[in-house]
Structure formats: structure tokens, C-alpha cells
Image: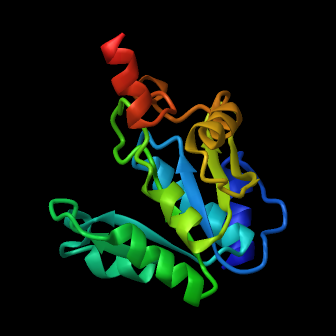
Amino acid sequence: MRRLAGWVLRRLGWRYHMPPPPEGSYVLIGAPHTSNWDFFVGILALWALGIRARWLGKKELFRPPLGWLLRLLGGIPVDRSKRSNLVDQVAEILKRERLAVLITPEGTRGKAPYWRTGFYYMALKAGVPIALGYADFRRKEVGIGGYLYPTGDIRRDFAAIRAFYQDKVGLRPEKQGPIRIQEEVEELASD
């Protein structure tokens, strides 16, 4: 599967890259997330890079007829209408098992005013790094650009994340929102 996925990506004109992953678990960001095509390019890249990742998706995606396939591809349905301790649950799994959990912090394919921070707190609570995964449609590059160990200073860590993603372009650039946390949006609104 690894060779086949790499071959398909190359035939489609994509390059893929990943520095050696850290030992153990990590949280993998999937960004920018502006189209359903991100999923297909991302899955091919995961296979080509030999990453066996689990990913979180809204439960509505897992309905028949394709729900079984999405689960087979590593999907974990999440009920976003319920408040739960999903961050704590995933952090515990990351501590116990050696795996990568893929999260799209924009939370939607549409333009979001800020990134959701659950991925950050999952990594922080589990003591694992955040992999800066990307699919840059302008350059036709996909992969992981590096690893960030969260410090607990979310503003400083988000500045580093923002710097990495500043030149990455999704398939639909008009749907890319700013890389900032909710508190930054609220501060801008109050000024």
C-alpha cells in the first residue's frame, strides 16, 4: 500500500515529505482544511509515509453507506453536539498506546474565525509532540513539516504554528481562516 500510495501521489504531481517521527505517540495537525479533497490527498500521504493514524470526524460522516469504510480508514466518530471530556479521553489513549491522532483544528472546510484548541491540549496533557501536517495545493506538497512540543504557553506555541502555516495554501484559499485562538478573536472584537 505504501508504494502504491506514493506512486499515485507522484503521478498526480505531488511531493511528500516527513522528518523522522518521534518515538511514541503524537498529535498530527491536518491543515489547511478547505475541501473534501484534503482527505484523499491526506490519506494517500499517510499511507505513502507509513503513518498509521487515527482521525476524528463528526459522527454524521459515519452513516451508511460509507461509515464502515471511514472506520476502516482510521476514523473515530465524534458527537460534537455533546459536551464531553474528549480531550482527556484522547490524551489518555495517547499515553497508553503508540499512535498518531489526526486532527483538523479548523473544525470545518469553511472559513473559521479561529482554530479549535483541543489538539493542543490533547498533546499537552499526554506529554506528546504536535506534528505539523500540511497539504499545500499551490506547491503540490504534502507531509509533516516538523514537530512542536507544547510548552503550556499557548500564545507562544500558536505563534510558532502560525509561522509554519503562513505560506501553506489549501485547495480553496478563500475558505482558509486565520490561525489564531478564540481568545485572540475576542480581544480583537473588544478593541
- Residue at position x 68%, y 63% in the image: 129
Q: Position of residue 11 (x, y in %)?
A: 71, 53
3 vs 125, nearest the viewer: 125
Q: Is residue 9 above or below residue 179?
A: below
Q: Residue furthest top?
A: 191
Taking 6 as reference, is 137 above or below it?
A: above
Residue 16 or residue 154, whichever sits in front: 154
Q: Residue furthest right?
A: 20
- Left or right: 159 with respect to 109? right
Q: Residue at x 69, y 31 (%)?
A: 163
Residue 189 location (% of width, % of height)? 32, 16
How far across and down, in percent of the image, does residue 174 sit? Answer: 43, 23
Q: How many marks?
A: 0
The quarter of the displayed image where residue 62 is located: bottom left
- Quarter of the figure with residue 165: top right
Residue 141 x/y as whole percent: 71, 44
| Left or right side of 99 for 112 | left
Q: Residue furthest left?
A: 81
Colour scheme of the rendered structure: rainbow
**Which residue is drawn at the image coordinates 45% and 30% (left, top)?**
176
Q: Quadrant of the N terminus?
A: bottom right
Q: Nearer the viewer, residue 139 or 115?
A: 115
Residue, x 64% and y 53% (percent of image)?
Answer: 133
- Quadrant that contains the C terminus: top left
In the picture, residue 34 is in which quadrant? Answer: top left
